[in-house]
Image: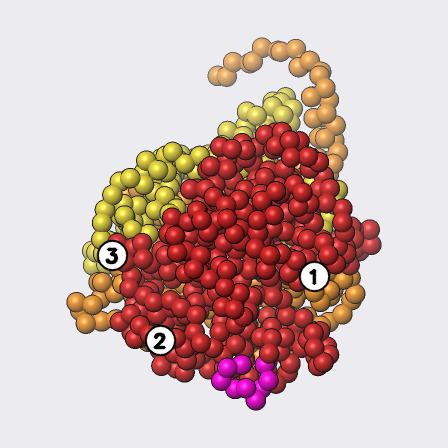
Chain colours: A yellow, B red, C orange
Amino acid sequence: MTESPLTRALLRLGTGLTLAFIYVPLFVIAIYAFNENISQTWPIDQYTTKWFRVAWEDENVRNALWMSVKAALGATAIALVLGTLASLAVARYRFFGKEAISFLVILPIALPGIITGLALQSTILNFLSPVGISFSIWTIIIGHATFCIVVVYNNTVARLRRVSSSLEEASADLGADSWQTFRYVTFPQMRSALLAGGLLAFALSFDEVIVTVFTSGAQQTLPIWMLTNFGRPKELPIVNVVALFVIVASVIPVWIAARITSGRPATMRADT
Amino acid sequence: MKHVRRKRISLASAAAFVGALAFLAAGCGGDDGGSSSASEDWQVSGLGSTLDEIQANAKNEGQVNLVIWAGYADKSWADEFTKQTGCKVNTKDGASSDDMVDQMATGEYDGVSASGDATLRLIAKGDVAPVNFDLTPNYADVFEGLKDQPYNTVDGVGYGVPHGRGPNYLVFRNDILPEDTNSWAPIWDGSQAGKLSIFNNPIFIADAAVYLKATQSDLGIDDPYELDEDQFNAAVDLLKKQRPDIGKYWDGETYADQVTTFKSGETTVGTTWPYQVNLMAAEKPPVSVTANKPTEGTTGWSDTWMISSKAKNPNCMYLWMDYIISPEANAKVAEYFGEAPSNEKACDLTSDANHCDTYHAKDEDWWKDVYYWSTPQADCGDDRGEVCKTYEDWQAAWAEIKG
Amino acid sequence: MNSVPHAEPPPRSNPGRRLSSFFHRHDRLRLGTLLAAPVAWLVVVYLGSLALLLMAAFWDTEPFTNDIVRRWNLDSFRQLWEQDVYRDVAWRTIKMAGLVTLADAVIAFPIAYYMARVASPRTRNLLVVAVLTPLWASYLVKAFAWRTMLGEQGFINWLLDPLGLGPPGDDWHVGSGWYSWDVDLWLTFAYFWLPFMILPIYAGLERIPSSLLEASGDLGARAVRTFFRVTLPLAFPAVVAGSIFTFSLTLGDYILPRFIADQQFVGTVIYERRSSALPFAAAFAMVPILVMTAYLFVAKRLGAFKEL
């Protein structure tokens, strides 16, 4: 390590402050889950745990949670497939328009969500509704998948670039056809990148509200349920409870993903 | 160089493809220009033709999706409805009438509790269907003064059942203004700098017009929603003067925030619905405020339940429309929200026996200076002709006012 | 001495193998098949919808119903140009996006550096989890938490009051006109997008081989010099990569400006007019599209795409 002890101490301080900055608001959310009143002033006047039971019994919460999970699974699956296809093409071939592909893939996530949402909603309202296709979980999935592709794509392209293609050539030389090569050589190398990309895509889709407002009609994912209820006095504490639950529940998959991606293949680090 | 040229070609061909696609689509896209006129065809597809049929169909539908003003479908009467009919009630709070019109345009909701500034737009767009009052028996007991109104009846065809009506109140904390304050002056004269709580929608321009009607009679304002050039500019100037004094805006989605800001003192004076006044009183400890209709008059709203022309659950919707104006439910919602009910019989059923008196349900004179929300149109409706500002003008001005 | 693998009979021919050999001979076709689905999706679903939206900017609306009338015109653009307020709104939005990006870059760098080069592997894992977890906390709940923290009787005032401090400027709003700065909104945006900045910088810093930094030290540069002459330039593309998100997310947000600061931003105006005045909303949407497209071109030049 080239850093001096002073530098490292300062870095530790900076890290600590940043972590505090990140977690104090989450701590506030957690505290408000125990708030008796509907108005969110500080300090809290009265504490209670009743909202946890109310949230548990609320059918709308459970339905919204399930809808979110389904939508996220669908979007992640599509993103995994499309992202992998695109990354295989870009990482293993030379063709004109290659740079345009990476530009195209990043566009849905680089352009503000309101534009993506508005564009998709206009298409649904003006071209799909007249022919009978209206808002449904599929329109939600399509919207999410479109900007989740890039997350998978980036991870897999980076991994494929790091893993030389000579392994695949060797596999072909030994008599494997394309599917076998993919299944036994390429895919295992990509697996952890796919997992990381998939988990990130799932997270993005699960908490997505900006685009979902436009693509969801009367269907409620969990963020939409929150949007509908966070302004309602009787429901606000439940919203805080649900948010707390999601934060806590998400730690596990995130931790798993971090463990998996930290074990990298022993390849050169100087390549990009 | 060749590589660059190839890249340009590929981008160009992509652009051409997209362009071609777009023009194709534009040519043969569905027609959504032009409004459908009011029709008497109240056969929303799937609707039964007798009460028994409707009740049977409703059990198959199992739910009704509504766009509502906050508090219009509380569990305390919605659950009873679900028990009686088997229709689960799903709701979305509208932030404003504009928001409600937008939501209904998606065709995803079965019904809406529309104020007068939304109803005619919904009718003109063809997003709502006429109502067959034979299938909503409780309509017979609705106050005559709410039936056949210009905002819910077109060419003699009725488009909804009246829900109830109410004024937009002046509200202030009792430790800031004396309790007998009954003028709008405090929100216009700059005395409450940084502490105002104002409704966030272009329709609020009408509130400025109401104040000018009383204080600057030389402008000749009669209908606060039909303003010509001079009247409009005066109202906009007044609002621009008010803008720096605003502590926090509120609307139909963030109304609960108003309770918080009044409690904390971030806002101390403003406009409100009776719903928030009830919420403030229910706080522990209660927020001490007074709310009233000032002498200059006020804007208000008379709401109508309308059914979507594309309703997926029309039978449940008809049952809801009949239920919400039934004496029991109408009494409950009138008390919960704090408004005048639409059903005469509801007055006997309110838990506070004086509710109808307090809220002037039978006192038509009291409503003479309550100007129900309505959509501004170019046709002033009087001898000035078509010189009045349209709602588009109001929206553009509101953006300028907010800055 | 390697043993000679005993001769195996050639693998049996089946449809899979035949297809695979076909693709092997027609390499370009395999490329095309790989690309077909993702490109078709993105071009048809995404670019197609975008093109249709932008076309609407040149159309008109029926005065009362606000239905779209497909009459080509430039009214929306004229209105955007003639009313000053929209210029103010656009500038306010772009300015905020820049300020947020700066703030996030500064806040993210120390923790990213610590994670990439100082922390032990176990600590690093924990930190990655710690940084990613807030992404799962609902956007709306975080927004509400900040709203209450910033409120008059909120957490921040509760902290600052005993010290005799209060919110900067006039209730979190500093300055006016072109130089105005909504501190409350700035803090909130910076908070929301921070993970999007930390992760790329962390990945970028991790990729720098220690040998380069050691070589710099061997050549006589002290730590600070190495940082500014070696580390920072190498990490810069990663910062730009992260900035794509912070900039874009701020540019299009339509919830926080209204909610935290009662301010009109490009996103809020587009959102409010999305149904009643779609041509106008589409015309105004050109602003963030053009800004982000330009930003992406510059970012690509700076090498950011490799750091995502």
Q: Mark 2 or 1, which is nearer the eye?
A: 2
Q: Amino acid at mark 2?
A: Thr
Chain identity of mark 3: B
The x, y position of residue B388, in whole percent, is: 67, 77
Q: Mark 1 or 3, which is nearer the eye?
A: 3
Q: Pick the residue in front: A7 or A169.
A: A7
Q: Is residue B17 visible?
A: no
The x, y position of residue B282, in whole percent, is: 31, 54
Q: Which residue corresponds to mark 3?
A: B285
Residue shown at the point (33%, 52%) measured from the top left: A38
C287 vs A269, left or right, is right
Residue shown at the point (76%, 70%) measured from the top left: C73
Q: Are marks 3 and 2 in contact (CB under 8 Å)?
A: no
Q: Callout 3: helix, strand or loop?
A: loop
Q: Residue furthest left?
A: C162
Chain identity of mark 1: C
In the image, which disc is placed on residue B181? 2
Q: Which residues are magenta?
A: B213-221
Chain identity of mark 2: B
First along the sequence among labels 3 and 2: 2
Q: Callout 1: helix, strand or loop?
A: loop
The x, y position of residue B248, in whole percent, is: 40, 68
Q: Callout 2: helix, strand or loop?
A: loop
